[in-house]
Image (spheres, rainbow, N blue to C red):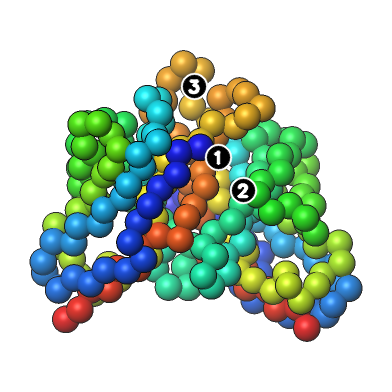
Amino acid sequence: DAKTTQPPSMDCAEGRAANLPCNHSTISGNEYVYWYRQIHSQGPQYIIHGLKNNETNEMASLIITEDRKSSTLILPHATLRDTAVYYCIVRARLDSGGSNYKLTFGKGTLLTVNP
Amino acid sequence: DVKVTQSSRYLVKRTGEKVFLECVQDMDHENMFWYRQDPGLGLRLIYFSYDVKMKEKGDIPEGYSVSREKKERFSLILESASTNQTSMYLCASSFTPLAGGFSGANVLTFGAGSRLTVL
């Protein structure tokens, strides 16, 4: 499995863009990058995923470098409700084969959005 | 709205008790997962299942077992609860991509969590 490295914490001012980095230098060619977040006392929530092209949805944008060794999750206008732990995950294929997969979560980045 | 429902939000059990944590999903997902979450350790995968009656060990299966008799239900069992199993338990589900394709599967939907305290 490709490992990911994220800073343990970041701060962002309300209304500004939050840029959360993730390093995944051992990622292989067919592995996707997923981002989830977990607001306090809730289960994690899916945000976005991508392979090699930049992706955007209603929640965020995902920028993946050309060599795919790192990525950045961008929340364009952070609000107080975006305060959460953000997880960057690389999909792992089950060793037992088949078309099923599992995700392994690391410790993530605690993003604090300040008023 | 799609949902993963965990039967109990909070449980308090005594050491040595048998504990059942139930999880039900209404999305017809093939895959179901049990994680535990502890401060400073993040989410750790206990067991997962990719089909009815199928199960695979995750990263920390010791002290746990699981049951998947029906597609929509995945149970986590603590045969003899111990204090080091005090934790937040999270259930999740996902669908399986079509063979040869990958269209956004592995998007996990999580339940709200079950906070277990073992005294």
Q: Is residue B1 left or right of residue A19?
A: right
Classify mark 1: helix, strand or loop.
strand
Q: Which residue is mark 3?
A: B98
Label 3: element kind = loop
| Residue pointed to by mark 1 | A102
- The vertical placement of A76 against B100, above or below, is below
Q: Label 1 to label 2, Cα distance in Å?
A: 9 Å
Amino acid type assigned to the residue bearing label 2 in the image? Phe
Q: Is residue A6 above or below residue B32?
A: below
Extreme top residue here?
Answer: B100
* Percent of width and height locating residue B94: 52, 41
Q: Let me know if residue A81 appears in the view.
A: no
User: Which quadrant of the rendered structure holds the C terminus of chain B?
Assistant: bottom right
Q: The disc numbered 1 marks a residue on which chain?
A: A
Q: For the residue marked with disc 3, what is the amino acid?
A: Leu
Q: In the picture provided, is B107 more to the left or to the right than B73?
A: left
Q: Amino acid at mark 1?
A: Lys
Q: Is residue B11 above or below residue A29?
A: below
Residue wearing tag 2: B33
Report if the CB atoms under discs 3 and 1 are less than 8 Å apart.
Answer: no
Q: Residues within 10 Å of mark 2 (few under 14, many from 20)?
A: many
Q: Please tell me in which quadrant of the rendered image residue A99 appears.
A: top right
Taking the spot 20% from the left edge, 31% from the top edge, the residue there is: A66
State left or right for residue A101 relative to residue B14. Answer: left
Whether tag 1 and tag 2 are in contact, CB under 8 A, the answer is yes
